[in-house]
Image (cartoon, rainbow, N blue to C red):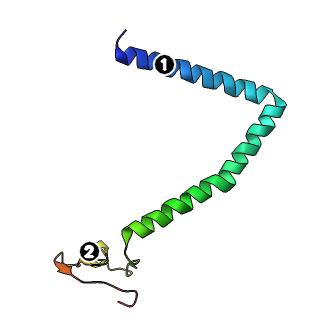
Amino acid sequence: MTHAHAEKAANLLIGAAIAGAACYVLKTPSLRRAAWRLAVTGLTGTVPAWFRQEVEQGWRESGGTPTVARPGAGAAATPSVSRAFAITPAGSAQPGFHQGAGA
């Protein structure tokens, strides 16, 4: 048996086991209620907390201020912004250029 065939067989076995477990949980009322409570907890608590953490981490890593696109200006008129180095709308690099909120 080749590696690809072994991997495909393992995936089929795991899929069958998951499907069997799901059927068993759905047929058993107490397990179904527990699964529902876990799903609600995950969707209302864990997922939003994870999403907020990812957004905050991305914001910290970006190190920049938000750039507001001007209506009708197009993508070329909105420069990339970072703390110490940015690309101007014309495409020339200017060290130290920083576009604040009032610009």
Q: Can you tell which quarter of the image residue 82 is in?
A: bottom left
Q: Which residue is mark 2?
A: 76
x, y percent for residue 79: 28, 77
Mark 2 belongs to which amino acid? Answer: Ala
Q: Is residue 40 left or right of residue 97?
A: right
Specify the farthest residue to the bottom. 102
Q: Residue at x 81, y 27 (%)?
A: 28
Q: Which mark is residue 10?
A: 1
Specify the farthest residue to the right. 29
> Label 2 neighbourhood size at 10 Å, few (<14), some (14-19), many (20+)?
few
Specify the farthest residue to the top. 1
Q: Is residue 45 left or right of residue 54?
A: right
Q: Quadrant of the N terminus?
A: top left
Q: Can you tell which quarter of the image residue 35 is in?
A: top right
> Label 1 neighbourhood size at 10 Å, few (<14), some (14-19), many (20+)?
few
Q: Is residue 44 above or below residue 83?
A: above
Q: Secondary structure at mark 2?
A: helix
x, y percent for residue 86: 25, 76
Specify the farthest residue to the left. 92
Mark 1 belongs to which amino acid? Answer: Ala
Q: Residue at x 74, y 24 (%)?
A: 24
x, y percent for residue 21: 68, 25
